[in-house]
Image (cartoon, rainbow, N blue to C red):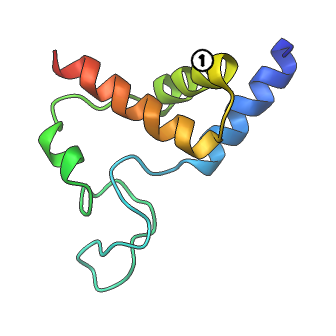
Amino acid sequence: MGPQRTAKWLTKLLQNRTFQDCNPGSSCGKGSPCSGSSCGKGNPAAKATASYKPTQEEIAARAFEIYQRDGGNDHENWLRAERELIARGRR
């Protein structure tokens, strides 16, 4: 994958992943479904690991590494990358 295609892939991934702490569809405590804002509600892991939050750029870069090595679904790669980075940050 060339650099230009890589940049497009990362841009698409970032545009589609505006949430880090929420589970879309869960309640944000405002009486409406979660819109993907970073409220921290609906994701117990987010509360337990509040000391380290990887940036979207860090997650995208790691998700792309996973994609290059293993292929797979961009959503699953994003979630896996986020979990790995959070786990590394807790050490």
Q: Residue at x 40, y 33 (%)?
A: 82
Residue position marked by numbered label 1 in the rendering: 65
Amino acid type at mark 1: Glu
Q: How many marks?
A: 1
Residue 58 placed where, x, y %?
Answer: 47, 23
Residue 48 placed where, x, y %?
Answer: 13, 42
Compared to residue 75, the image places residue 32 above or below, namely below
Q: Residue at x 48, y 33 (%)?
A: 56
Residue 39 placed where, x, y %?
Answer: 28, 58
Quadrant, the C terminus:
top left
Residue 63 placed where, x, y %?
Answer: 56, 27
Q: Secondary structure at mark 1?
A: helix
Q: Quadrant of residue 30?
A: bottom left
- Packing grade of label 1 (10 A; few <14, some 14-19, many >=20) is some
Q: Residue at x 42, y 73 (%)?
A: 25
Q: Quadrant of residue 61?
A: top right
